[in-house]
Image: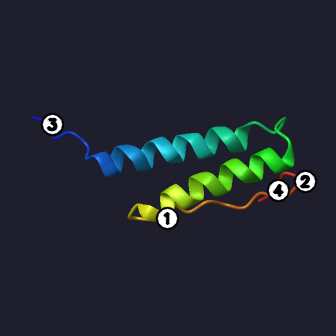
Amino acid sequence: MDKKPTLKEQLTTQIKDKISKIQMTKKMTNLNYKRQITFYKQISNCLEPKIKIKKIRKNGKK
């Protein structure tokens, strides 16, 4: 029997997905982008292990 992922694990994967989606959409205005990233960062800070978020500069390089 496969053990179901815990709620914490589910949340972490969901947040990771969200963050990667946000980083994919470059059409988003810078302010909006920052707001969403900080929002997910705050959520991820409550979870362990913490999610590492790479900072992306305006020119798109990491």
| Residue 26: % across, % down | 81, 39
Residue under label 2: 59
Instruction: Determine whether the residue tagged by mark 4 lies in a helix, strand or loop.
Output: loop
Residue under label 3: 2
Farthest residue in the right direction? 59
First of labels 4, 3 by sequence position: 3
Q: Relative to 36, is 56 above or below? A: below
Do residues under tags 2 and 4 come within 8 Å of each other at their CB atoms?
yes
Q: Within 10 angstroms of label 3, few (less than 14), some, or many (20 or more) residues? A: few
Q: Which mark is residue 61?
A: 4
Q: Within 10 angstroms of label 1, few (less than 14), some, or many (20 or more) residues? A: few
The amino acid sitting under disc 1 is Asn
First of labels 3, 2 by sequence position: 3
Disc nearest the viewer among 1 and 4: 1
| Residue 32: % across, % down | 78, 45
| Residue 19: % across, % down | 61, 46
Q: CA distance from mark 1 to mark 3?
A: 28 Å
Do residues under tags 3 and 2 come within 8 Å of each other at their CB atoms?
no
- Identified at 9% across, 34% down, the residue is 1
